[in-house]
Image: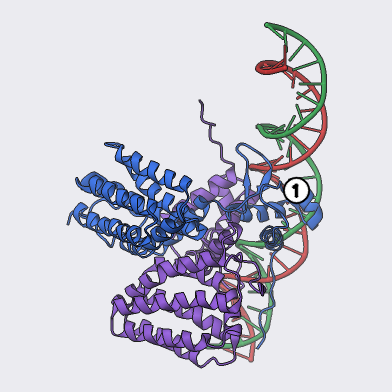
Chain colours: A blue, B purple, C green, D red
Amino acid sequence: MFEPLGYAPAYLRVSEEIRGRILRRELTEGEALPTETELARQFEVNRSTVREALRKLESAGLLGRRRGGKRLYVTRPTREAVGGGLSQALALHRARVVDVWEALQAVQPGIAAAAALRRDEAALDRLEAVAQRFAASQGDRAQAVADVAGFFDALGEASGNPVFVLLNEPLLRLLKPSLAIIIDRVPQARSRIEAAQAQVVAAVRARDAATASDWMARHVRDFRRGYEVAGIALSTGVGESPDAAVS
Amino acid sequence: MFEPLGYAPAYLRVSEEIRGRILRRELTEGEALPTETELARQFEVNRSTVREALRKLESAGLLGRRRGGKRLYVTRPTREAVGGGLSQALALHRARVVDVWEALQAVQPGIAAAAALRRDEAALDRLEAVAQRFAASQGDRAQAVADVAGFFDALGEASGNPVFVLLNEPLLRLLKPSLAIIIDRVPQARSRIEAAQAQVVAAVRARDAATASDWMARHVRDFRRGYEVAGIALSTGVGESPDAAVS
DNA sequence: CGAATGATATTGTCCGACAATCAGACAGGC
DNA sequence: GCCTGTCTGATTGTCGGACAATATCATTCG
């Protein structure tokens, strides 16, 4: 009959108030937050309460610190912060590598198409640089993995769409462990990746959205073959070690 | 030349320790966390320090409270929590409605295809129920918007892929405000949406991935037409009021 | 057996305190 | 002129203790 009347502890109200100011851009990025003592004075709560509120905003990525600094600054969530949260959530939701792969398969062709249509010279340069570094990374497994992910990332940047960039990050993060295994175990993986990247780069340079999209789809499809050849069970949970499954 | 030697304040180390336990599933979902006093005793820090750590985990969605409850329980981030964080980040990154639309366009056909391949009866029922409720929602703007979003959502669920479900949430959340305006201003919007939903439902029932994907693409494409007809500037930032632009 | 009751535990908030250290000013030496 | 060493004040990180409100749980009562 009656709704429970809402009650929010002070630390929450303080944190919501500050969050609102940031989202409404009344506190702008890069601006230093008042000191804890000052905030406590203004909100008329104890400094401990303010600190609890700040910890929430800090972990939401809305507040950050300059390197080695002490004061808190208003900041926007970095791609890493967002990606970390999302991939953590996916791990807890027991997403499997095949689920991540499927999402990648759904979204990457669209990203490639957008990148082909809207890329500028600088973005194209970055994309090429990553592809070349991958091709040159013979033997260095960690570098190779970073570059494969970096290629996706550069493509997202080239699309000029921040949504793509932010969505990409957690998927790539979850992909990496199994990707490392593929590169180790599948001899032809490097050359196939290299070829696909070259085709995508060419299509993006030519602003040929259809071809870019098509080759990106093949590129992602190859990963699935890679899982099978490397003996990684598709049902491996992300966050688990994607090692064994020698079956 | 030298890396800064890492230092982490106690509240961070405590929060990381607990986070690790949760991710490694040593603390399982639904389990009650020890009391603050007990945690302080075990970590040998002050209760205030523990509380700061808990606030971080709370805002990451890893800890939650039962309705009106006092104790903290281990929980996994709800779709709402994840979506809220991501859409907040997108707003701060000045994503525009056209960016969200583009992402939707990229990902929804894939979701529809996956749903068509893997849907079970229960998921199909839910999908149909939402579509029918939308069709019956004449006049009720809020309900109609909720149902359009709910349709996407139900499709994500039907795909059985938690990645799709979690990626969908923030996009839908950002889509809703402008969707409300479209439904208000574009007379033929309702009937077009209804038709597209019917086609998608039919294809999903028939397990026809290609057709489901195709109709979903049309459905999303229609939104873009909707923006134009409704006079919503495509460059409107998400989080802003998508109202004006009568130009 | 279910509902009221009372004791206990736990959280939310406050206060005051102190060490570490960051930021800036300031002076001295090459 | 620039770098180094020193000083001072401000700010954060952490602590201990305190207390009111209330959720939790075992008990008693109908």
Asked if residue A68 is positioned above or below residue B134 in the image, the reply reads above
Q: Quadrant of the C terminus of chain A?
A: bottom left
Asked if residue B115 is positioned above or below residue B22 in the image, the reply reads below
Tell me the residue at 42%/84% (across/down).
B196
- Three-letter amino acid code of the residue under disc 1: Pro
Q: Quadrant of residue A112?
A: bottom left
Is residue A150 found left or right of B171 in the rendered image?
left
Residues B176 and A213: in front is A213
Q: Which chain letter matches label 1?
A: A
Q: Residue under circle 1? A: A34
Indicate the position of residue B106 as horizontal and vertical percent values. 41, 67
Residue A35 in view, yes or no: yes
Indicate the position of residue A41 as horizontal and vertical percent values. 81, 52
Q: Quadrant of the N terminus of chain A?
A: bottom right
Tell me the residue at 60%/56% (across/down).
B55
Q: Secondary structure at mark 1?
A: loop
